């Protein structure tokens, strides 16, 4: 079995970066077109777009989409989620927007893995869960603000006086009974999943074999070069069967083993044969201000291997120990991380504030005009509400 992996295709870091950037659609101006359809297409291609609450600048789900859709507007995501219903929210490595067509691949987790999400779900009583679901069934979608609980639960943390219904809503969401039909900032509206999507019954749950194939296909599409770590990101239990699936495809010539420069023999990668042909083409000259939660950034180990850059999210680091700043954003110039800029939006004054600018890698002042131009576009996006 291992003999077939003894002669992988050698790929230098520049070529590996080109493959990844092309797969991430960061090498062309409008890879998904425009409008709500482009938003749905981007989520479908990437597989997931992470959601986060921090809004020092625009929240990361909007930021990630703007990076790949220059004409992106926030209402495009609302259209995709609430009207077209081509995307939905659920948990992958974090809470994310996912393509609705992939719903059935998450059904087994909805039925099984919700217990792992939080110990506090154990406090939800069956009657509380039924009460919340029945109320939505009879009265329509609601937010946590629409519910008045007579009794608050005991505080478990200084900040955590919680309505019992909040736990019930979240549990019903993780179980797949409820879905988030729309979002206003971070205020979520919950609706019956079947009613929201217009389904008479849930889709057929995917088998484990189908899930593995889906995960591998998603990684190949969005990463170009895949490893067991990237195909099973934060899901190590699936690595053994994923390896068997990959090796079966190598035997049939559908995947090619690749030795990425600097990875070492224990960190294997694979790619579709046609992807390696495209690795020879240079990437377009472009500048992107990236979210720290961008798919190119959040896997720190992979980022370090491909770009020689180690990003540290310092929002929770004491101020005197920060290197790049509270909410530092990597700047991609062509095929290198050239700078890290700590930004903050002053919405009252209508401007984007540069808190700190740090050159990294081969970045230098010669690149500042190009980055400044990208910052001006980014500022307009921040303030165009």
Image (spheres, helix red, strand yellow):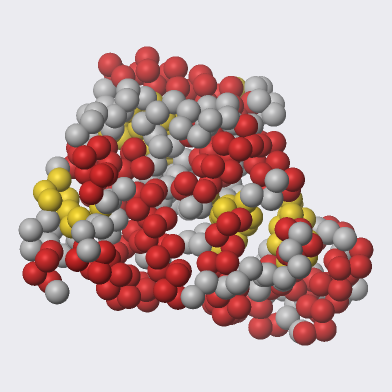
| Front position in the image: 272 or 184 | 272
Q: Quadrant of residue 240?
A: bottom left
| Front position in the image: 279 or 168 | 279
**Residue 348 coordinates in the image, percent (x, y):** 69, 26
| Front position in the image: 102 or 170 | 102
- Up the image or down, 122 lies above or below 168; here it is below
**Residue 242 coordinates in the image, percent (x, y):** 32, 70
Seen at 58% across and 22% down, the residue is: 380
Seen at 66% across and 78% down, the residue is: 121
Whether residue 90 is visible, yes or no, is yes
In the picture provided, is 136 more to the left or to the right than 378? Answer: right
| Front position in the image: 190 or 247 | 247
Q: Quadrant of residue 131?
A: bottom right
Where, quadrant-wise, is the N terminus in this rendering? Answer: bottom left
Whether residue 353 is visible, yes or no, is no
Seen at 57% across and 36% down, the residue is: 38
In the picture provided, is 344 more to the left or to the right than 36? Answer: left
């Amino acid at each position: 079995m291992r003999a077939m992996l003894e002669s992988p295709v050698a790929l230098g870091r520049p070529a590996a970066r080109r493959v990844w950037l092309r797969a991430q659609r960061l090498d062309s101006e409008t890879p998904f077109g425009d409008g709500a359809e482009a938003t749905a297409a981007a989520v479908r291609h990437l597989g997931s777009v992470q959601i986060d609450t921090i809004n020092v600048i625009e929240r990361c789900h909007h930021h990630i989409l703007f990076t790949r859709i220059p004409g992106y507007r926030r209402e495009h995501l609302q259209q995709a989620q609430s009207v077209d219903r081509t995307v939905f929210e659920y948990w992958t490595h974090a809470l994310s927007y996912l393509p609705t067509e992939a719903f059935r691949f998450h059904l087994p987790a909805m039925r099984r893995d919700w217990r792992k999400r939080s110990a506090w779900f154990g406090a939800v009583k069956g009657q509380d869960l039924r009460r919340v679901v029945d109320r939505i069934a009879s009265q329509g979608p609601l937010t946590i603000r629409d519910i008045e609980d007579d009794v608050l639960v005991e505080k478990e943390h200084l900040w955590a006086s919680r309505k019992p219904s909040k736990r019930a809503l979240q549990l019903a969401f993780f179980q797949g009974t409820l879905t988030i039909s729309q979002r206003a900032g971070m205020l979520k509206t919950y609706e019956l999943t079947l009613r929201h999507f217009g389904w008479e019954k849930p889709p057929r749950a995917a088998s484990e074999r189908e899930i593995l194939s889906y995960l591998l296909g998603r990684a190949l599409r969005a990463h170009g070069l895949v490893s067991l770590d990237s195909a099973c990101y934060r899901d190590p239990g699936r690595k053994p069967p994923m390896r068997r699936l990959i090796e079966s495809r190598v035997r049939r010539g559908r995947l090619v083993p690749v030795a990425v420069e600097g990875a070492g023999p224990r960190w294997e990668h694979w790619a579709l044969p046609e992807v390696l042909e495209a690795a020879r083409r240079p990437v377009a000259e472009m500048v992107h201000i990236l979210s720290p939660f961008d798919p190119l950034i959040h896997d720190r180990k992979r980022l370090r291997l491909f770009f020689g850059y180690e990003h540290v999210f310092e929002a929770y680091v004491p101020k005197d120990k920060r290197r790049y700043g509270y909410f530092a954003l990597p700047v991609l110039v062509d095929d290198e991380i050239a700078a890290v800029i700590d930004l903050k939006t002053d919405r009252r004054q209508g401007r984007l504030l540069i808190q700190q600018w740090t050159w990294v890698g081969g970045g230098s002042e010669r690149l500042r005009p190009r980055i400044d131009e990208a910052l001006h576009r980014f500022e307009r996006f921040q303030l165009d509400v």
